[in-house]
Amino acid sequence: MGSSWEIPKNLNLDKIKDDAIGIDLGTTRCCCAVSRSKGVIETVPLDNTGQRLLPSFVGYDEKNIKCGRIVIDRINNYLNSTVFDVKRIIGRKFSEITVDPSWTFSLKSDNNDNPLIETTNHCGNLITLPPSQVSVVLLKHIKNESEKFQGKKLKNVVITVPAVFSDRQCEKTIEAANLAEFDSVTLLPEPIAAAFSYFFDREIPNNSNMLLFDLGGGTLDVCVFRIFNDKINIISKSGDSEIGGRNFDNDLFEYLKRKLENEFNINNIDIKKYKLLRKCQEIKEALSAVNDYSFDVSDFDTTKDAFIKITREKLEQLSHDLMGKIKTTINIALDDKDIQPNEINSILLVGGGSRIPMIQNLLHNIFPNSEQRIEINPDEAVAKGAAYYSCHLLSNMELNDQIQDRWEVATIYAENELRGAASSIEIASVKLSMLKPRDVPTVGVSIPQ
């Protein structure tokens, strides 16, 4: 397949029914989309309030492990039992990971430099978890909610991963999906999924050069591609798994913490760290729509009747270094194939961070003649694109004993690990060397032809 992707079109709707499911397993939030009647794609409510975005937070403070908004709402009371950001950890070596000071859990290394997460369970005991086990909790929840939404079991899934994910990160994502009881798993690069979402039901702009800019909560993907003969041909890509919308929150947090400590003598901010971080996210999102925001100091000390005015310009000043890193990531994608900015016809904006005005201004400054497109919900684009691709796979295969005619099923046996051997397979254009860990059920991996 290389780096060429056919945009899903002309689907056989009789075969799709309501079996397709695509999951955006995000660093900070997850989203899931499924096929409804006649191939219509809908995002799935992932909690009992109807929210379509599930915060990627897992809480171990009760016997029944929870995830999502309820964990965030209780985080100040159960700091030592909360795990998040697992996408920044899964499949990486311990020595490669930069520890985030906002993490409420600890990391340690096993004898092979693999990271292990330490947190506290409902009995107050310290427990140690491989990162993939945290992803399993999220995937099981998403699977259960999707099956309730569809009224049936869902077995074959398309899960998106960043374009910069390594082989091992892909392997561990598949392992988590398998443990969440998906029979077949197809991995799809997030930029490709987002592009599918843009063009699945729209006119395909053939002979166009495009740059897809995907700034999620915890990762940045930049992909340059050309559309020719209804196919996406990847020219270059770059990314950073430690840059996301939450970095803007962190910059704002440090600023407000200093203000509260130095000007208002409020010195217990660390106790209320996550309350302030949530407020910073709220401020960042508000400043995408308005020019200033009044921060109420009394929220952190009821004896203080004061406000801190935060302007959009101030947020841009605080984020200067971060914006420099984002610009560098864009330039890497351009320089890799000596692409000139004036060769880009359109920019597709994806991810919640793409709503930030300074991001759109940065892109305009680099690509002054390129159209910026954000006509679909940037938070849902990747999940919907994954569901479209799932429809594409299902419409070109018989869901019966002939499944192997369309999808190869790669079976990785435990003795590979014992021999120290690896089975090389290709998953959605990602070359992957897989070792199946002991005591893990056989992984069924779907490979589109």
Image (spheres, helix red, strand yellow):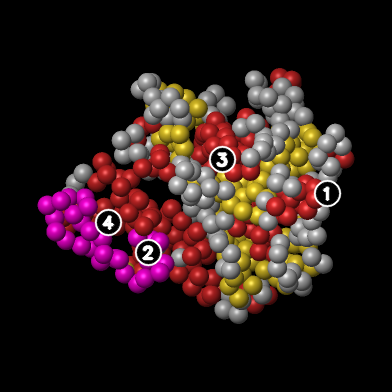
Q: Are marks 2 and 4 in contact (CB under 8 Å)?
A: no
Q: Nearer the viewer, mark 2 or mark 4?
A: 2
Q: Secondary structure at mark 4?
A: helix
The residue under label 3 is 145
The residue under label 1 is 396
Q: Between disc 4 and disc 1, whose residue precedes? A: 4
Q: Secondary structure at mark 3?
A: helix
Task: Work out whether residue 311 or residue 16 is closer to the camera in this orientation and state it.
Answer: 16
The residue under label 4 is 256
Name the residue type under label 2.
Ala
Q: Are marks 3 and 4 in contact (CB under 8 Å)?
A: no
Residue at position x 70%, y 68% in the image: 202
Q: Are marks 1 and 3 in contact (CB under 8 Å)?
A: no
Report how far apart the C-alphas of labels 2 and 1 lie in the structure: 44 Å
Mark 3 Cα shell of 10 Å, populated few (<14), some (14-19), many (≥20): some
Q: Between disc 3 and disc 2, whose residue precedes? A: 3
Residue at position x 18%, y 54% in the image: 298
- Whether residue 95 is visible here, answered yes or no, is yes
Report how far apart the C-alphas of labels 1 and 3 lie in the structure: 26 Å
Name the residue type under label 3.
Glu
